[in-house]
């Protein structure tokens, strides 16, 4: 089953791997400098020769480290942004008579409540993303174990999405549904 956030597992794995490598390198450096490891001689120079590199090399190394650090921070920050961007809809027939603004979160709240009440559904989150002319509904439904997902999907599309599209005055509302199966509650021993 595909996920709405496909690269998340790869990103988290790579971040964890890079973090472990950096921690290991730091621990090795610290242990060597304190004399706990005798792999390298503490008094030996790091590179052969005793001349310093040209000044421009130091500036390039610092600039590359800063850029790389900022890229990693951006990559790390992107992990927190799991939800697609939503916006505010402007509903107007005649701007002279006024404009109605509708938050996409407010638009999907009744849909989430309706679908959460379906049998076999534990929880639902929905996001209406994209421009107002071509919106896409992204639904993540957590279903009870043993629920017939094809029947549930059909009911969500035929009832919930159709009602939401009618309420938003849309001819069609492309929908992506992701199902998650809820973990069964462990039996309690009393």
Image (spheres, helix red, strand yellow):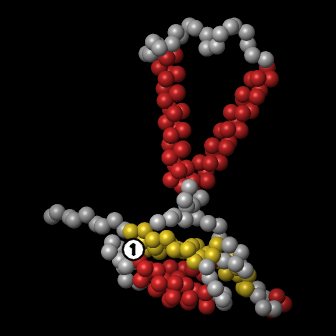
Which residue is found at the position 52% from the left and 9% from the top? 41
Which residue is found at the position 52% from the left and 38% from the top? 19
Instruction: Estimate the x, y position of residue 178 in percent, counting from the top left.
Output: 49, 70
Instruction: Estimate the x, y position of residue 3 in percent, counting from the top left.
Output: 51, 64
**Residue 106 visible to an observer of this rendering:** no
The crowd level at tag 1 (other Cα within 10 Å; few <14, some 14-19, many 20+) is many
| Disc 1 secondary structure class | strand
Instruction: Estimate the x, y position of residue 183 in percent, counting from the top left.
Output: 34, 65
Instruction: Estimate the x, y position of residue 80 in percent, counting from the top left.
Output: 57, 55
Locate the C terminus and report the quarter of the image it occupies. bottom left
- The single residue placed furthest to the left in the displayed view is 190
Which residue is found at the position 28% from the left and 66% from the top? 185
Quadrant of the image occupied by residue 46: top right
In the image, 78: left or right of 20? right
Judge by depth and name the residue closer to the eye, 63 or 176: 176
Q: Is residue 41 above or below residue 120?
A: above
Residue assigned mark 1: 143
């Amino acid at each position: 089953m595909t996920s709405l956030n496909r690269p998340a597992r790869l990103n988290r794995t790579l971040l964890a791997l890079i973090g472990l490598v950096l921690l290991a390198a730091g621990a090795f450096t610290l242990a060597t400098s304190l004399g706990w490891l005798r792999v390298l001689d503490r008094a030996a120079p790091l590179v052969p020769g005793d001349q310093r590199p040209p000044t421009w090399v130091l500036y390039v190394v610092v600039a590359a480290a800063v850029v790389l650090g900022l890229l990693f921070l951006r990559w790390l920050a992107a992990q927190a942004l799991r939800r697609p961007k939503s916006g505010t809809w402007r509903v107007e027939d005649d701007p002279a008579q006024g404009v109605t603004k509708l938050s996409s979160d407010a638009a999907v709240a009744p849909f989430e409540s309706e679908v959460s009440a379906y049998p076999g559904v534990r929880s639902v989150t929905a996001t209406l993303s994209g421009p107002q002319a071509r919106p896409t509904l992204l639904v993540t439904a957590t279903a009870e174990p043993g629920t017939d997902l094809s029947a549930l999907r059909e009911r969500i599309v035929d009832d919930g999405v159709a009602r939401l599209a009618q309420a938003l005055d849309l001819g069609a509302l492309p929908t992506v549904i992701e199902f998650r199966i809820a973990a069964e509650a462990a039996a309690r021993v009393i």
